[in-house]
Image (cartoon, grey):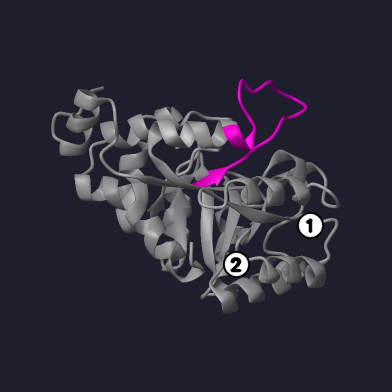
Amino acid sequence: MINNKSRIAAEFWETGKLPCYIRDFHAHMDEHAQIYFPFSSAEDMVADMDRNNVRSLFFCGHFALDDPLYGEKYNVDAVRKFPDRLRAYHIIHSRCLNPVKEIDEVDKNPDIYVGFKLLGDYNYFPVDSAIHDPYYDYLSQTGKLLLLHTWGGSGYDGYEQVYNIAKRFPALRIICGHSFFGTHKEGIERTRQFPNIYYELTAVPIMRGVLEEIVNLAGSERVLFGTDLPWFSTMHGVGMVLGADITDDDRLNIFHRNGDKLIQSLNI
């Protein structure tokens, strides 16, 4: 839908190019055993970034999600191949933890890692369990990021679990991947009191009107652009933001302003 109220949208429709850059805070990479991706390599990711004016992509590859011992190598290799465009989240496997070693890896490689990622639903383990506290304490002290997979109705990474984490670690900068998909209203109302919580848009584009609700509830200053690339299309996400009934200031906040502030201390 063409949004004739937006200068940014109008320029995009006229030129085919977005007049501002994007920071994508939620992506993956590499092949996946259960689905075919037309493109999934680091080269493919960067080509997609170029097409859509994405300046930086923060990701955790599928190999790392599946293999806690050897999968991180693929994340490291991708970032070293494209150091000006890519940064990785180090995965936390709740059933295979080694906090001393993993924190050391993140701490010694700021040119590779922006923080940690945790998927409670994948591990069948609640993200607010105290076993994760060493990671949360480290991230709180350093200002690095925690990307959480959050999903509506989950007993592992729903909004109550996120609330419990933020209450114990108020300085922890938490990105709520998928914005508690399916329960975004309840999730934001429960967690928006914590200023270091951000709401990320992966999967949101499949439901018309949800972005407007998230902006109204949380303020556009708390919303981050994300795609889950290559699971979802960057262009789809861009179209959602351009077509939403929000202001151009909101769009710029979502596309890059909030992300710029979030990573300012990380020297990216």
Q: Left or right: 161 with respect to 224?
A: right
Quadrant of the drawing holding the N terminus: top left
- Location of residue 242 (image quadrant): top left
Q: Is residue 40 magenta?
A: yes
Q: Which residue lies furthest to the bottom in this view?
A: 141
Mark 1 highlights which residue? 94
- Number of dots carrying numbers: 2
Closer to the camera in the image, 266 or 124: 266
Q: In this picture, which residue range is highlighted in magenta?
A: 25-43
Residue at horizontal 79 percent and vertical 69 percent from the top: 99
Percent x, y of residue 35: 70, 23
> Secondary structure under badge 2?
helix
Mark 2 highlights which residue? 164
Q: Along the polypeptide, which appears first: circle 1 or circle 2?
A: 1
Q: What residue type is labelled 2?
A: Asn
Q: What residue type is labelled 1?
A: Ser
- Crowd tier of the residue under label 1, counting other residues whose Cα lies within 10 Å: few below 14, some 14–19, many 20 or above: some
| Distance of label 1 from label 2 (alpha carbons) | 17 Å
